[in-house]
Image (cartoon, grey):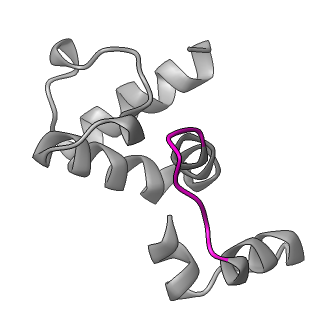
Amino acid sequence: MTPDEIWILQHACQAARIDATKIKPENPFKKSGSTATLLQASVAEFAPEQAARWRCDAGGGLSVQTLSEIQAGSDLSKAAINDF
């Protein structure tokens, strides 16, 4: 895990009020459960690009519509944001 990814996880934990001492430096999208869900949502809220990378690495993916909106470079629709 890169220093930037660790920084993102640390801040996602703070935002979601998760005890970061209990979180390992691993892709949170490979985990399940309530804590993982909170952490995933927190990452997606303030670091959507990283959330997308981690989701894809975990075997998930984004819809074609979301990918199209990302490539266009404009603000993402609510549906695209929810796709993260």
Is residue 80 depicted above or below 3 in this figure?
below
Q: Quadrant of residue 19?
A: top left
Residue found at x 87% / y 78%: 72
Q: Position of residue 35 (x, y in %)?
A: 15, 41
Residue found at x 22% / y 50%: 38
Q: Say which of 74 and 33 sits in front.
A: 33
Q: Position of residue 66 (x, y in %)?
A: 67, 76
Q: Main secondary structure of the magenta part?
A: loop
Instruction: Decide whether residue 61 is among the magenta residues.
Output: yes
Q: Residue furthest right?
A: 72
Q: Position of residue 62 (x, y in %)?
A: 61, 66
Residue found at x 59% / y 59%: 61
Is residue 9 depicted above or below 20 in this figure?
below
Residue found at x 57% / y 79%: 80
Q: Quadrant of residue 5?
A: top right
Q: Say which of 31 and 78 sits in front.
A: 31
Q: Residue furthest front?
A: 59
12 horizontally vs 81: left or right: left
Q: Which residues are magenta?
A: 57-63
Is residue 1 depicted above or below 19 in this figure?
above
Instruction: Decide whether residue 20 is among the magenta residues.
Output: no
Q: Say which of 83 and 48 sits in front.
A: 83
82 horizontally vs 66: left or right: left
Is residue 36 depicted above or below 24 in this figure?
below
Image quadrant holding the N terminus, namely top right
